[in-house]
Image (spheres, coloured by chain):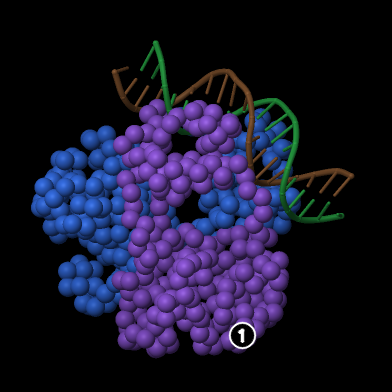
Chain colours: A purple, B blue, C brown, D green
Amino acid sequence: MSIIYKYQNIYKQLKQDIDQGRYTADFPLPPQEQLADKYDTSRMTIKKALALLSNDGLIYSNQGSGTFIRKSFDASNKELLPLAAPKGATNSHAGNQIKSKTLQFSARLPYENEQESLGITANEPVYEIQRVRYVDNRVYSFEQTVMPTSIAVIDQKVLEGSIYDYLQDNAGITLKGARRTVYASHADKTVAAALKIQTGDATLVIEQTAFSQTGQPFEHSLSYFLPDSSKFYIDININ
Amino acid sequence: MSIIYKYQNIYKQLKQDIDQGRYTADFPLPPQEQLADKYDTSRMTIKKALALLSNDGLIYSNQGSGTFIRKSFDASNKELLPLAAPKGATNSHAGNQIKSKTLQFSARLPYENEQESLGITANEPVYEIQRVRYVDNRVYSFEQTVMPTSIAVIDQKVLEGSIYDYLQDNAGITLKGARRTVYASHADKTVAAALKIQTGDATLVIEQTAFSQTGQPFEHSLSYFLPDSSKFYIDININ
DNA sequence: TAGTGGTCTAGACCACCTG
DNA sequence: AGGTGGTCTAGACCACTAC
């Protein structure tokens, strides 16, 4: 959160231009050379801005012919969230009312799979946190989070908001990356009770290991989502 | 598939060096300047190679301190597949025996949601294909694919292999990108029968719209996977 | 303060598509 | 052949980290 680079600015402006229909899907964008002139910069910098747009799935480029706007995705569906967005509900549902209810908050020794994914020994205690997340007062997800106690001191109050923001401000730990694994599973008694569904109902599970700027995994979590209503997308671009 | 760029070569070599332990997780990689010397190239090119490694989740860089190897993920789990890999089973399970059984192959007019995602009118007919995929003779997935008939002529034989390869060779259509949406759902009668599970059991659904090099969506598919066993991962890197 | 990675430049050349 | 995007260069300067 600090200085804004040139290519980020250009990215924002181009995005706005596309959103507002100043460039249409029927014609290619102006050539990179021309954009470089317009924004008084070099082609490399334009390419960086275009790469961001491409990652968003908004445009695509064809060597030899030009850069084009992808026929629009419907971005209005609030239940459809980017799988690649780093933070959880706190960020993705900006503008909606988000609440958390803590079902459990304790410390214990880590299980073997947790030792492995967090890169810690069997003797290093971890917090275990279970929270139900509500968006606009409707049950949204059930999250089980495990985090080494050595990372930072956590209390009840922290759990009501975004743990990431707290860690950044208080422990100097920045979220730098994560591996997410998704699969379907049947809800066990605990999950079913938390999500207010039947035991055995289908749930979407997102398992996440989060990394700090030092490459150290500092959080392992399992998030359970309701079937059919909670959907996550990812845009794939080849080369 | 043609010329290999310098940064791709460097990427390959660095990857090999990391895999073979020539660089270890305890020390940073050589500085970019030094790598540029070693590979007789410029820093920008080194950065492109490093970006590929970073996308793989293999390394991460910290401004000011260096580039480091991420403590290894276990890549041995065959059931864990990259969500961002563009092709389906044909590619991801290379080395395993893959078979397809076609349950249905017909043409019809598209539903409204299909018209929208494929960008076609209600009058343009589509193929509807239902296939069960087997990996090493075990049921792996059930796929419902919808594709405009105007794209290419498809016959039974094509369906036994990779549709993408066929389209590339015969219709000049290259897979350029895709949007995938994942969610959990309860199996209906058709899905349950295909996957040999109970009606109402949990399934993972991956909905995909595939784009050609012209930005034209040419395929819409729903793939159903078994709960708990089929998992997909994605590595997220922030800036 | 030294060293690192991130940005940015102003070009050159190459690969590819479209006339 | 002309125009497009992709690669690559050889630097400069900036932001950040570590000592």
- Image location of residue B184, percent across then percent down: 33, 71
For residue B202, above or below residue B239 = below
Q: Quadrant of residue A193?
A: bottom left
The one of A32 and B38 positioned closer to us in this rendering: A32
Q: Quadrant of the N terminus of chain A?
A: bottom right
Q: Residue at x 32, y 45 (%)?
A: A71
Q: Quadrant of residue B140?
A: bottom left
Crowding around mark 1 (Cα neighbors within 10 Å: few <14, some 14 to 19, many 20+) is few
The one of B73 and A36 positioned closer to us in this rendering: A36
- Image location of residue B8, percent across then percent down: 53, 37
Q: Residue at x 33, y 71 (%)?
A: A229
The one of B168 and A32 positioned closer to us in this rendering: A32
Task: Name the residue beneath numbered marker 1.
Answer: A156
Q: Residue at x 25, y 40 (%)?
A: B167
Q: Quadrant of residue B37?
A: top right
Callout 1 amino acid: Gln
**Chain name for mark 1:** A
